[in-house]
Amino acid sequence: MSTETLEAPVVETVKMNGLQAINAALMEAMEADPKVLVLGEDIADNEGGGVVGVTRGLSTRFGTMRVRSTPISEQAIMGAAIGAAMAGYKPVAEIMLMNFTTVAMDMIVNHAAKLRFMSGGQSQVPLVIRTLTGAGNQTAGQHADFYEAWFAHTAGIKVVIPWTPADMKGLYLSAIQDPDPVIIVESGKTLFVPMDVPVDQGAIPLGKANVVVPGTDLTIVSYGQMMFTVMQAVEELTAAGVSVEVVDLRTISPWDKQTVLASAEKTGRLLVVHEAGRNFGPGAEIAATVQEELFGKLKTPVGRLGAPYCAVPFAKKLEDAYLVQPPEIVAEVKRLLAIG
């Protein structure tokens, strides 16, 4: 018998940040399907390509009929996008910031999410809603909230919050082809950090978590820009001899219950960390489910870390206090492990 080991195939990669990865996904999807449209405020090239430049280059390449700059009206954007989706197109609609989705909540929750159900499956709404949010840049209480729990609570709409540029590209490609509405939340800090992206990065299925770091002592589940904070904490914990398994949820609804349960059962301990408020946040649903499914198998109750029950502060010191920081994660892990 040969003792030679098979070498893992070399994956060719390119450095991209999140902005470039999303742009590449939109470009690829629009090239492949003339039914894919993009619309939102100031998204054309002569207007800068959107609030952070994600759509830069698209209107020059595909024309302003497929890359439509809209009035400053979230309701108009969503109404046009829903109508286009029902007419057979695949619109990608940008709502500049997640707080502004509240202006179009009726359109999103009562129309986009429910039309397939209320029509008995006769009408589909293959719609992607892009939106940006996240504290840490002093944009204050009306520009930085994570409202993913609102949308995850609404049947009929999927909620995606990617962390890495590779995931951004792959999840966007899947979302655009999905027959139902998908809201993709772009966490502010994740858009500007270059990482390796496979040259042939294809679609990543929605609803599948990613085990980023394997471990045996405790599982941490997180997503979006909070993953940077988690990874900083894990680096310190690893140096202290603690083996932490890190699961990047990627999709909030439907969340990957199987992967989280398998990891929590293996390690016996679970900590959920998210930027959204701890009260009634996604971590509460995850914690309740894991406690129900693994009752008697966990070594400690599930831990949760999230923002306090208040608006996002503007002052830098208050904003830092609002956000979960690495020392808090380290302290909570040690508490769950009963170590000093």
Image (cartoon, grey):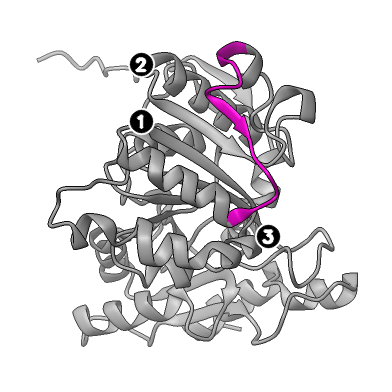
Instruction: Look at the image and tell me in which quarter the C terminus lies.
Output: bottom right
Kindly identify the amino acid type of the residue bearing the numbered disc 2. Answer: Pro
Kindly identify the amino acid type of the residue bearing the numbered disc 3. Answer: Gly
Residue 206 higher or lower than 289, as above or below = above
Kindly identify the amino acid type of the residue bearing the numbered disc 1. Answer: Ala
Residue placed under numbered mark 3 in the picture: 134
Residue placed under numbered mark 1 in the picture: 203
Q: First in sequence: mark 1 or mark 3? A: 3
Pick the front one: 338 or 80? 80
Dot 3: element: loop
* Region of the chain picked out in magenta, as a range: 61-74
The nearer-to-camera label among 2 and 1 is 1
Q: Is residue 182 visible?
A: yes
Q: Quadrant of residue 151?
A: bottom left
Q: Position of residue 56 (x, y in %)?
A: 69, 25
Dot 1: element: loop
In the picture, measured across the screen, residue 27 lies left or right of residue 320, that is: left
Q: Position of residue 74 (x, y in %)?
A: 60, 54
Q: First in sequence: mark 2 or mark 1? A: 2
Pick the front one: 4 or 129? 129
Alpha carbons under labels 1 and 3: distance apart: 25 Å
Pick the front one: 286 or 73? 73
Alpha carbons under labels 2 and 3: distance apart: 37 Å
In the picture, measured across the screen, residue 207 lies left or right of residue 121, that is: right
Counting other residues with Cα less than 10 Å from the Cα at mark 2, is it few (<14), some (14-19), or many (20 or more)? few
Q: Is 276 covered by the magenta stretch? A: no
Counting other residues with Cα less than 10 Å from the Cα at mark 3, is it few (<14), some (14-19), or many (20 or more)? many
Residue 123 higher or lower than 312, as above or below = above
Q: Tell whether label 1 touches label 2 (CB within 8 Å).
A: no
Which residue is found at the position 68% from the left and 33% from the top?
43
Residue placed under numbered mark 2 in the picture: 9
